[in-house]
Amino acid sequence: MVAARPISSSRLPGLAFFLVVASAAAMSVLVLMPLIVVFHDAFLKGLGKYLASIRDPDALSAVRLTLLVAAIAVPLNALFGIAAAWCIAKFEFRGKGALLTLIDLPFSMSPVVSGLVWVLLFGAQGWFGTWLLDHDIKIIFATSGLVLATILVTFPFVARELIPLMQDQGADEEAAALTLGASGFTTFWMITLPNIRWALLYGVLLCNARAMGEFGAVSVVSGHIRGLTTTLPLHVEVLYNDYDFVGAFAAASLLASLGLITLVLKTGLEWRHAGELSANRRR
Amino acid sequence: MTEQAVLPGPGAGLVKRPRRAPWVQHSILPGFGLSLGITLAYLGAIVVLPLIALAVRPWELGLAGVWHALAAPRVAAALKLSFGISALAALVNAPLGLLIAWTLTRYVFPGRRILDALVDLPFALPTAVAGIALTALYAPTGPLGSLAARVGLKTAYSPLGIFIALVFIGLPFVVRSLQPVLQDFDQELEEAATTLGANAVQRAVRVILPALAPSLISGVSLAFARAVGEYGSVVFIAGNLPGRTEIAPLLIVIKLEQYDYAGAAAIGLAMVAISFGSLALINWLQLFLAGRGRA
């Protein structure tokens, strides 16, 4: 059953078998069981209760808000990712290293800090708090705050997929198109975009999954106003804290499905279009 | 991009070559100003400006005030808990990640690809979902929590629960850091060691492990950095008892609810500073090990 690839290890079929079983067991307990329990607990009181929880008006508005926030945050970060990758990968200029560090920075920040910084700027006692109040603009405890927090958390996803790939690809094809008389836009549209489309899709996929599933950062800026500023992950929290476990796990099952679909598409991209993803994504 | 790469195209002599600042090497490609402009403006608004606020606002309290805010028993306990358990979870992830990365790259067995895809599940599962799922599993009435209770262990609502959640979210970092190195590992080195009479244990410890060390360290440090800031998967299982199972990110949330912006910013800044300090230390360790391996 267990075939060892390298010659050296094939002398230890017993050890190989043991290691495979041990990792499968560890993965099952640590990773697979939490996934199973989400769906198990969501359907604990039957299909009727499950459907009722999902059709609840607060749940539906949470789904709508989650989709809205992702629909704003993901395209903005994708556009930024393309622009950043274009100038970093196709040109040589000083200060590139610092720029790359700054782009990666949001990955090493706590999600809670990514929410906190917006409160420090736009909260009631934030730097722009009084100005916003005078002009009757609401950012914290409103949709725009959720969007800003989500943008910060998912900031590097697309750029990070595109920069290494476009650096590998160089600028020769674009240079050839331009010397043949193509305009800058045509060159980008006909040469660059087809070259990066799968990596772009990969980055957008990861960015979107994180944007829809983000909890810590949006939790800080949301204020948890039911039906108004609760995204789907926050809706899960509200229900869970109200001891509505079936409702919480029903909403969580939607998010878990999103995660599973993302995982399947991501793995598919890694297998099918390995050559067109950045090198560290090839499997 | 050098001058040689630029071919004289049709009309090249007619178009006046745009002059660029001396810190940019000349290129025939257009859009440098536009793309850099968009990048800097967006980066400035989304990352730099907020970070300036984080760096500046704690000092409204004054130096003594910041120290006072951080040294308060509840805050100090939370920081110690967050960094301590994160380090512990990252360290446990090292052998666990090594085991999984090893079996995934070295053996062919049914279900290998599924197991490989499952490694990313902690990335893909939203943290709040992971949080309530882990709590349901490890609560005293849950399937795993009741098992642990039988041997006298309290899992959920204790530091052990936090530890389990942090192992869960940190695992993919270690596995994914190790996999490419294990995949590319030169098998001839192992074979050479075998012909020289090394047994399996000697090969693993003296040939393979030194080659893996840099990526193992980087995987562990990524897992550590993620664990320190983790919120969603921890708050549900932690129990959040002040001074005992209250993590630093939660304390930021609590301070904000009390409108103590400067205090919240102080904790946030301290977390960022300690994280960067430990990552720098780990980086140095990695360079040190890599240098020794080459010598």
Image (spheres, rainbow, N blue to C red):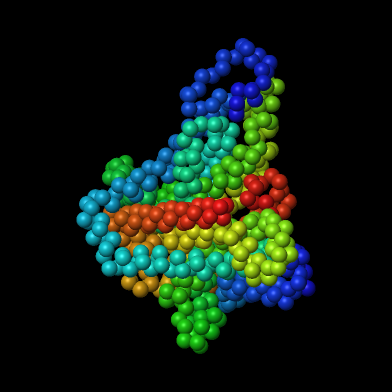
The residue depicted at 67 percent of the width and 30 percent of the height is A172
**Residue at the far front in the pictured view:** B196
Give how far across and how far down residue A98 sits, in percent.
46, 40
Q: Is residue B92 above or below residue A191?
A: below
**Residue at the far bottom in the pictured view:** B150
- The answer to which of A75 and B286 lies nearer the viewer is B286
Quadrant (top left/top right/bottom left/bottom right) for the C terminus of chain A: bottom right
Q: Is residue B165 above or below residue A199?
A: below
Give how far across and how far down residue A42 sits, in percent.
57, 72
- The answer to which of B158 and A11 lies nearer the viewer is A11
Q: Is residue A19 left or right of residue A150?
A: right
Give how far across and how far down residue A195 sits, in percent.
68, 38
The residue depicted at 40 percent of the width and 64 percent of the height is B83
Q: Is residue A258 left or right of residue B145?
A: right
Tell me if I can see residue B99 in this picture. yes
Give how far across and how far down residue A70 sits, in percent.
53, 50
Tell me if I can see residue A17 in this picture. no
Q: Is residue B263 above or below residue A47?
A: above
Q: Quadrant of residue B253?
A: bottom left
